[in-house]
Image (cartoon, grey):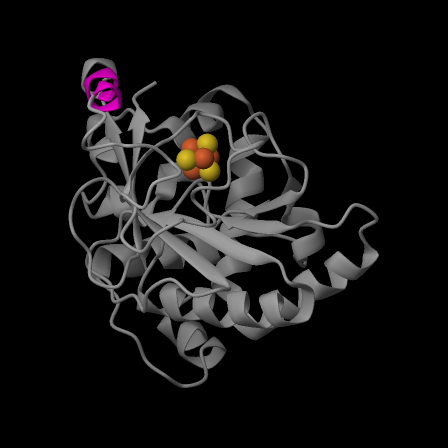
């Protein structure tokens, strides 16, 4: 498959795609599969996220664009948390490959339409949509698609979308009521409202002890701590202040 499909799907706007990423896209789109629907490719909750969070990936960590471009420190060091299950649980990689194909061949509008239909059929309604537990943006067309689908879904259902990215080379348009974008790690990226910074245990505890710099969640300081389970915490999806930095202890 090729750039022609991308151009067609994204309404004749052409996007610049690095050759390494184009190769990745071609490979993922060439995989044989039956017709794909969002309903079959959405997971509701996991060990860290509540069942009210719908999870959809752009693809496997093994074929992550940020890893391919050397933009993710975990991808570079071979310590990607998202890749672990792909190596040890045989059903995970094929499932994520299907998600990649679905993501690459579906427009933002069609993604939103399928989500809204699924929302209507679910008895336990999701309250959040988490994109990209594994994988990352392939190119600027993903950023634009995310904003499109998130806006349509929010307007129809009130469900907010959030996701993390390591793509420091793309253009973002800031956080909105329908979308929370979180930059993983410390490189400043224009247009991303929140940053999620992983530090070692000692640094984490020292920062926690520094009451002046980190007065607490309730203050209007912009430094926060990740409590480690999103089942009760909603800091990432609803950052309390613009420019929030959320510190996470490496695991
Ligand atoms: S800060 Fe809260 S929402 Fe964000 S990853 Fe940590 S537990 Fe989850």
Q: Which residues are magenta?
A: 204-209
- 35 left or right, relative to 19: right
Q: Can residue 107 be seen at all in this image of the molecule?
A: no
Q: Nearer the viewer, residue 19 or 9?
A: 9
In reply to whether residue 184 is colored magenta, the answer given is: no
Determine the residue located farthest toward the top in the rendered image.
202
Which residue lies at the image location 34% right of the left edge and 18% below the top edge?
251
- 125 left or right, relative to 191: right
Q: How many marks?
A: 0
When asked about the image quadrant of residue 102, the answer is: bottom right
Query: Please, what is the dominant secondary structure of the magenta stretch?
Result: helix
Residue 29 vs 141, above or below: the answer is above
- Ligand 1, by image quadrant, is top left
Q: Nearer the viewer, residue 27 or 47?
A: 47
Determine the residue located farthest toward the left in the rendered image.
187
Instruction: Indicate the position of residue 160 as horizontal and vertical percent values.
Output: 55, 57
When asked about the image quadrant of residue 111, the answer is: bottom right
Which residue lies at the image location 20% right of the left edge and 34% below the top edge?
73
Which residue lies at the image location 52% right of the left edge and 65% below the top edge?
150
In reply to whether residue 208 is colored magenta, the answer given is: yes
Which residue lies at the image location 53% right of the left edge and 70% below the top edge?
151
Instruction: Indicate the position of residue 119 as horizontal and vertical percent values.
Output: 74, 58
Looking at the figure, which quarter contains the N terminus?
bottom left
Instruction: Indicate the position of residue 162 as horizontal and vertical percent values.
Output: 47, 52
Determine the residue located farthest toward the bottom in the rendered image.
12
Residue 107 vs 47, above or below: the answer is below
Residue 70 vs 200, above or below: the answer is below
Instruction: Indicate the position of residue 118 as horizontal and vertical percent values.
Output: 74, 58
Q: Nearer the viewer, residue 15 or 189?
A: 189
Q: Can residue 127 be seen at all in this image of the molecule?
A: yes
Q: Nearer the viewer, residue 7 or 196?
A: 196
């Amino acid at each position: 498959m090729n750039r022609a499909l991308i151009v067609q799907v994204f309404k004749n706007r052409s996007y610049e795609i690095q050759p390494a990423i184009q190769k990745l896209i071609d490979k993922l789109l060439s995989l044989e599969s039956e017709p794909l629907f969002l309903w079959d490719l959405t997971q509701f909750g996991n060990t860290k996220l509540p069942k009210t969070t719908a999870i959809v990936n752009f693809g496997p960590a093994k074929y992550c664009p940020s890893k391919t471009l050397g933009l993710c420190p975990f991808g570079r060091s071979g310590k990607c948390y998202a890749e672990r299950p792909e190596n040890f649980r045989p059903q995970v990689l094929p499932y994520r490959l299907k998600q990649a194909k679905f993501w690459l061949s579906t427009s933002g509008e069609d993604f939103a339409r399928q989500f809204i239909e699924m929302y209507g059929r679910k008895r336990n309604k999701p309250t959040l949509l988490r994109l990209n537990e594994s994988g990352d943006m392939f190119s600027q067309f993903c950023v634009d698609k995310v904003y499109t689908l998130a806006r349509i879904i929010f307007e129809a259902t009130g469900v907010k979308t959030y996701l993390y990215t390591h793509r420091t080379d793309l253009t973002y348009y800031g956080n909105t009521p329908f979308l929370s974008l979180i930059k993983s790690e410390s490189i400043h990226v224009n247009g991303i409202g929140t940053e999620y910074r992983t530090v070692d245990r000692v640094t984490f505890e020292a920062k926690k002890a520094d009451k002046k710099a980190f007065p607490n969640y309730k203050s209007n300081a912009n430094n926060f701590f990740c409590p480690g389970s999103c089942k009760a915490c909603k800091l990432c999806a609803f950052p309390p202040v613009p420019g929030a930095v959320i510190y996470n202890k490496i695991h």
